[in-house]
């Protein structure tokens, strides 16, 4: 079988047993499955392709566990607002004007940005999901996708959204050489009635799929939930049975100790969207406490309308610094744990830990090469520290997903970036403000 070998790299495996190899090699087969990780071997003649990493770092592709790709069309359009105003007065009116074309090119813009900054796997919750899935397929990226359901309007509209979400989830699950998997997604407890959420949960059970939702993002949301349903969002969703399904929640900023115990009990996964939460002034999620309680936390960007980029290295540095600062405790979320949140814990947050998240034999070759020939990667002694505290997405040089190279020398090989940029600017000019 023809195999490719990457040689002479510093390998950050994120495998619990051996987290790095100096002067190491990675081998993967035609199916993009890793068959060897270790020291660079002497004899390289048996390999179809030999790629010399020249001492650069190679690490697992990053995993972004919450976002809305197509909202990149709205980047920079409505900054410096709180969530509810931003959503109701700015995002939703423009999203109402989206066509499948807007969704498509917005998705391409986000995918190119993510691949070029080292994210190989991401979650997307949006509308027009066929367009998103096709863009993922073409780009070579890996994604867990769901049609986000906002439950406003008539019963018929809700029923048709659920049918659309289910058809999409069935049709695309395990497609694109297994790179696409799906979920069902009520947008949030404040946009979906209890009855609608229950219907979505029942459908997820039927289809054997996980669920994904926004939860406890702002204090306002929690207070409103309490007023309307007599419970805060965590208990509310628990009572509706959501957590009996595998669940990924985005945000969980306003959760108390008792609620964190509930999340831990049901193994609910939390996507921490630190920059989006800061920018929308939603608050800072109690991540160190969640980690203490054994909750599976990962990192998300949310959309580039509230971030305003999708460079997960920014989340990585911030998660390793902000929680230290606000808690006056420099031991919180050390570099290695931060990198786990962005890699292996991200993979387990979306139930893909047997496939990606670390570089080890049997997993898919989803890998990122960082160009370490830059001053801030020296002295070269602690790769994980440098990746977390010194690197940025601009240092990503090459990217592979399932063994296929999708970025080479900082250029995306699978998507025509110039065309994408032309199309998003053209489409932005179609909006009526
Ligand atoms: C149709 S599902 C996607 C829906 O979610 C909205 N959205 C984007 N960011 C956030 C956020 O931080 N909290 C809640 N909802 C958000 C987006 O505008 C779409 O309408
Ligand atoms: Zn979101």
Image (cartoon, rainbow, N blue to C red):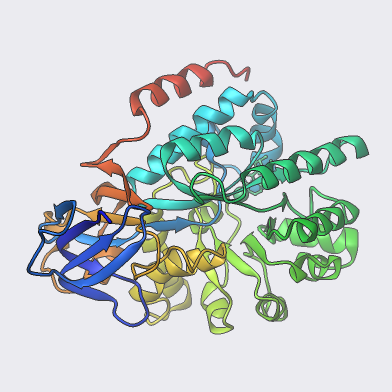
Q: Which residue: 20% across, 74% down?
A: 21
What percent of the width, then of the height, locates residue 379? 10, 68
- Residue farthest to the left, as pictured: 42
Closest to the observer, 117 or 335: 117
Q: Is residue 417 left or right of residue 144?
A: left
Q: Would residue 107 be visible to someone looking at this image?
A: yes
Tell me: residue 331, above or below residue 270: below
Q: Decide which of 82, 370 is in the foreground and name it.
A: 370
Hey, which quadrant is residue 383 in on the image? bottom left
Q: Is residue 79 visible?
A: no
Choose between 185 and 285: the one closer to the eye. Answer: 185
Q: Residue 388: x and y, percent?
A: 31, 65
Q: Is residue 112 left or right of residue 132?
A: left
Position of the N terminus, as image quadrant, is bottom left
Q: Nearer the viewer, residue 382 or 2?
A: 2
Q: Quadrant of the C terminus?
A: top right
Relative to 226, is 410 above or below? above
Picture coordinates of residue 24 (x, y %)? Answer: 17, 69
In the picture, measured across the screen, residue 17 lies left or right of residue 124, that is left
Residue appearing at x 39%, y 62% in the figure? 316
The image quadrant of residue 210 is: bottom right
Residue at 76% x, 57% y is: 204
User: Where is residue 112 drawn, in percent x and y?
Assistant: 39, 38
Residue at the limit of the structure toward the front, as seen here: 1
Count of numbered circles on the image: 0
């Amino acid at each position: 079988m023809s195999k490719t070998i990457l040689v002479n790299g510093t390998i950050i495996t994120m495998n619990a047993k051996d987290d790095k190899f100096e002067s190491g090699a990675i081998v993967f087969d035609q199916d993009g499955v890793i068959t060897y990780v270790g020291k660079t071997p002497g004899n390289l003649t048996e390999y179809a392709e030999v790629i010399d990493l020249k001492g650069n770092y190679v690490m697992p592709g990053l995993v972004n566990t919450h976002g809305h790709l197509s909202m990149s069309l709205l980047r920079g359009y409505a900054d410096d607002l709180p969530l509810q105003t931003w959503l109701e007065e700015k995002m939703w009116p423009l999203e109402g004007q989206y066509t499948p074309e807007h969704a498509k090119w917005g998705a391409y813009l986000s995918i190119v940005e993510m691949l070029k900054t080292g994210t190989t796997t991401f979650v997307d919750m949006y509308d027009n999901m066929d367009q998103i899935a096709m863009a993922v397929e073409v780009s070579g990226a890996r994604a867990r996708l769901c049609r986000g359901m906002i439950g406003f309007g008539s019963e018929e509209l809700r029923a048709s959204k659920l049918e659309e979400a289910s058809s999409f989830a069935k049709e695309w699950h395990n497609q694109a050489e297994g790179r696409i998997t799906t979920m069902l997604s009520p947008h949030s407890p404040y946009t979906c009635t209890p009855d609608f959420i229950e219907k979505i949960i029942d459908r997820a059970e039927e289809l054997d799929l996980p669920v994904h939702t926004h939860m406890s993002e702002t204090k306002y949301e929690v207070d409103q939930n309490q007023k309307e349903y007599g419970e805060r969002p965590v208990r509310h969703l628990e009572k509706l049975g959501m957590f009996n399904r595998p669940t990924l929640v985005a945000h969980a900023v306003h959760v108390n100790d008792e609620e964190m115990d509930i999340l831990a009990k049901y193994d609910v996964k939390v996507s921490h969207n630190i920059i989006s939460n800061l920018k929308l002034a939603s608050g800072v999620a109690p991540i160190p406490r969640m980690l203490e309680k054994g909750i599976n936390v990962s990192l998300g960007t949310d959309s580039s309308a509230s971030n305003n980029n999708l460079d997960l290295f920014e989340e990585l540095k911030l998660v390793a610094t902000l929680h230290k600062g606000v808690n006056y405790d420099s031991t919180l979320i050390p570099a290695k744990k931060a990198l786990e949140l962005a890699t292996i814990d991200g993979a387990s947050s979306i139930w893909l830990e047997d496939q990606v998240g670390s570089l080890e034999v049997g997993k898919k070759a989803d890998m990122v090469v960082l160009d370490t020939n830059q001053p801030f990667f020296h002295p070269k002694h602690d790769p994980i520290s440098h990746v977390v505290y010194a690197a940025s997405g601009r240092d990503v040089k090459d990217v592979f997903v399932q063994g296929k190279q999708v970025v080479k020398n900082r250029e995306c090989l699978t998507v025509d970036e110039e065309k994408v940029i032309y199309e998003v600017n053209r489409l932005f000019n179609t909006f009526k403000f």
